[in-house]
Image (cartoon, coloured by chain):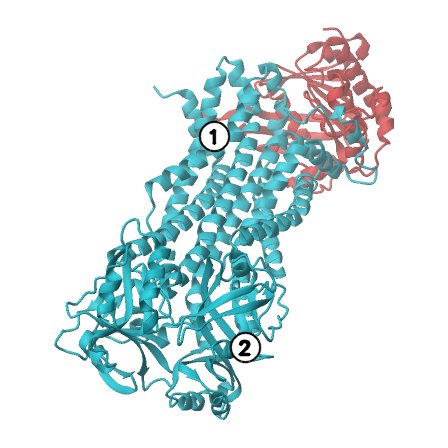
Chain colours: A red, B cyan
Amino acid sequence: MQVREREATNSSTQLPAPVFVARGLTKVYGSGVSQVIALKDVNLDIRQGEFIVLLGPSGSGKSTLLNILGGLDAPTSGTATWRDHELTGASDEELTTYRREHVGLVFQFYNLIPSLTVEENVRLVAQIASDPMKPTEALELVGLSHRAGRFPSQLSGGEQQRVAVARAIVKRPDILLCDEPTGALDVDTGRLVLAAIAKVNAELNTTTVVITHNSAIAGMADRVLRLSGGRIVKEEPNPKRIRAEDVAW
Amino acid sequence: MVNVLDIKVLRELWSMRLQVLSIALLVAAGVAVFVMSLSNYLALVGAMEAHYRNERFAEVFASLTRAPLAVVDRIREVDGVGVVESRVSEPLRVIREDTNLPISGRVISLPASGQPLLNRLHLVQGRWPDPLRPDEVIVNVAYAEARAVRPGDTIDVVLNGRLQDFHMVGSALSPEFVFATRAAVPLPDDRNFVVLWANEDAVISAFDMEGAFNDVSMTLAPGASMPHVLEEVDRLLAPYGSTGAYDRSDQLSHRFLEDELAEQETLSIVMPSVFFGIAAFLLNVVTGRMVEAQRGQIASLKALGFGNRTIVFHYFKLVSAIALLGTAIGLALGRWFASGVVGAYRSFFRFPLLEAQIEPWLIVGAMVVSVAAANLAAASAVYRIATLAPAEAMRPGTPPALGTFGWLQTVGSKRIPLQYVMAARSVLGRPVRTLLTTVGIALAIPLVLFGLYWFDAIDYMIDVSFGRIERGDAFLTFTEPVSADALYELQSIPGVLKAELQRVVPIRLRAGHRTYRTSATGLESGSELKIPRDRSLRPIAVPSDGIMLSRTIARQLDLNLNDNVTIEVLEGNRTVRDVAVRKISDDILGATVTMERTALNRLLREGNMSNVAALRIDLRQSDLLWSRIKLMPKVEGSSVKALWLALFNETIGGLVLIGALILSGFGILIAIGVIYNSARVALQERAWELASLRIVGLTRREVTAVIFSELAVELVVAVPAGLLIGWYLIKLIASARASESFQIPAVIDPSSYAIASILVVGAAVASFMMIRRRIDKLDLVAVLKTRD
């Protein structure tokens, strides 16, 4: 990965310097008639420890943005930089290293490995990380240490999603990216998952980005970005963060 | 309007084209081997039957010293005898300036009318002899080709001790000499054995046979009894020095041909059937898994309201299309190889017309078996999935609720990287699937081994026959028995390192009502140039009195140790004597009667006589040696081991090479088909899981390790199992073909095991490399949008 030699300071505000900087991010799928523009000239700064919620309808480009942030996809043009790592134009190996060292990912469908137990799913990531916490510790954080020996198929959806959160945080990621983490869950279960994510954000100071089309979750964020048609159409700081337990939808 | 499901069939065939192709090639390999081998075998049998029928090959034969022509009329009167024809057939020697090796053969009289009634000639080149020209002859095609003689050439022939010039006017094939050879020599050698057909007058005058004959052939009338005819003909000819009437099974060329055909039967029917059977089984496994992997689609179709029958039929079309594509490729390949192989047969099997033909029933049969095998597992898999409730079917069928296998949680240790734990659980959690894949890979090994085995078997047979049993470098046959002085004469020839005399005499063994026609071999005591051996290749000591019998003969005649058996000598004074069976041997050559030479001489009431010599020679002096032997008038013919082996390698060796390469090549194709498909389906089923691993940060190499270690485990089990199965199948096939003559031994060289293993592991690695490209290209983003 290219290392940019630049001073990561921003003297014009009192806020900490951004850890993630995107400039003119554009993502185009296909070509010609079937061309779909998923992201259009997106500029974005994300600061250390920030809890950001990306809101928007289906097709607004929020998953594409998250995938680019997570090193799962590459933009068609523009630049994306995480600290001194240039993500644009990085090779597959470089992106894999980026994901394994810095990024924790949580998805709508959990993406747990069915043939591994809860503890093993978490340990799978711990074994490839440089400074992981103990798998049991991660499970404790999401309140699932009593389920460590079960297989995913023996858990409820909410429990599976909390395992996914534990798996994402066990490596002490610098950035936690969650794509519709409550999309497949009911309200009560969803709250438990959100609480786990908020706890990680608060206790480990992990920069957190959550995608949702559920505006109720926005109340938990430091900042809410609204996407539409591939652009960030609105940016709303949220000085009064609510607790996950108080989210209602 | 085109059915949308049919469009789905076509699109899927295209999108899975590599998988479709590998399955089709698996089918093609099975079909090609089967069709090629069977059509070749049928072509041989058909060509033999046509030749025998068209050229009216006789059914009963007898040779004698000399009988008046009036005896022919008496034979004709025997109940059951059809057409009878007598002739004069005598030994000859050919002199050629370009060789010192004795060339022996036979001259056979042609009736004045031209074509004989029986054992007619199929003229290949030239014309018939002019009845008014006693010096014109027809030559057998095998010799003409081997020595490059053409119509118009002169042949110097020694007949009855007199040198005569003959003019070749044509070459012909005869059903009597499909394999031209002479008794007492195990090696048919086209270069040194010739058959000349000459005008009756010329032969009769050369041998003073006016009003007489010494050879007779006949056919049987419909419904005739063969034993009765043989007995009556024997009775009539006994006073004239007959060596005994015999049927086709004792006719030299036919017997040799039958042995060859029996070997071909193993090569052409038994082995390809096993091959095709295994291919069909593997096809079954592969298509079953392919359909299993479409579980989600089947469930969706079902949920949309398609009936079970429609869905099963839809998959029947998909699977049958693949099977038929493979069958078509297989038929084309089979036909192509068949005509090539038959071309190679032509120089070995001398038939007027030998053409590979693919019978319509063979085409239909291959199609039916392929389609049935392909659909057997596929249809049952479709049906099993289709009969589930759609909601249940839409859930992934695998893994089977792993939590229920509590013990699986104990598999794995904290020290083992989890991708290997995943692989181990996948292997152990689906034991049936693992077993089928492992068996599939294992069965590919015998297919490769079958081809290699033929090399080993032939090498072994040559080593045993000509390295350990017949240890002489050259063999001589004499026109008549010679005394022991011949030994000193031979030993005095420069270049002869060792000489041994043998007495070989045609006999009939009789025990009660059972008879067996063969020849008895009398060996010097402590013979070094011919050593009978048992199946473990240990030398067998020949008893000093009585006879030693092969177990196969003893069994046929129901004889035990120390029983008496009657020996009827079928030449000379036709002695009939009772002798004791002193040893029953499990000799590797199958069916022999062996005695000490002096014991055989006593039985024949003759002195110290012999008619075959085995020589160990100094090859550096062979020119001088053969020029001296050429001057010995009593030497009828010779065989040189080295020349024969070279000839063997050119003909049979070539045939075996082609057959073995084809079998092994197709075996490898099948191995690739099975392994590629197993890995491909494994990947298809687990793409989601593997992509998830990539997403959480595992590298391509780490993810590849999951699938690779599964395959590695299957290979580690499959390869030894496959070698064991191969060994067992070959043993089974070899013992199924245990005949009287040389048995095809179940010997497999360690190098063949190694080669088969390396080739199959290589096929696995190649398949895996193709799969690896797909792992590298897993679509990580797509995986996030779908639930498994």
Residue B492 locus on image (x, y percent):
49, 93
Instruction: Decide if residue B66 is in sight here.
Output: yes
Report crowding for label 1: few under 14, some 14 to 19, many 20 or more residues within 10 A (C-alpha).
few
User: x%, y% of residue B60?
Assistant: 32, 61
What is the chain letter for disc 1? A
Q: Residue at x 40, y 38 (%)?
A: B365
Quadrant (top left/top right/bottom left/bottom right) for the N terminus of chain B:
top left
Q: Which residue is mark 1?
A: A31
Q: Secondary structure at mark 1?
A: loop
Q: Callout 2, which amino acid?
A: Ala
Q: Is residue A8 visible?
A: no
Measure the alpha-carbon separation of dots 2 and 1: 98 Å
* Residue found farthest to the top: A249
Classed neighbour count for the residue bearing mark 2: other residues with Cα under 10 Å, few (<14), some (14–19), many (≥20) = some
Q: Which residue is mark 2?
A: B599
Quadrant in the picture for residue B436? top right
Q: Is residue B90 left or right of residue B293?
A: left
The residue that appears at 51% across and 47% down in the rendered structure is: B669
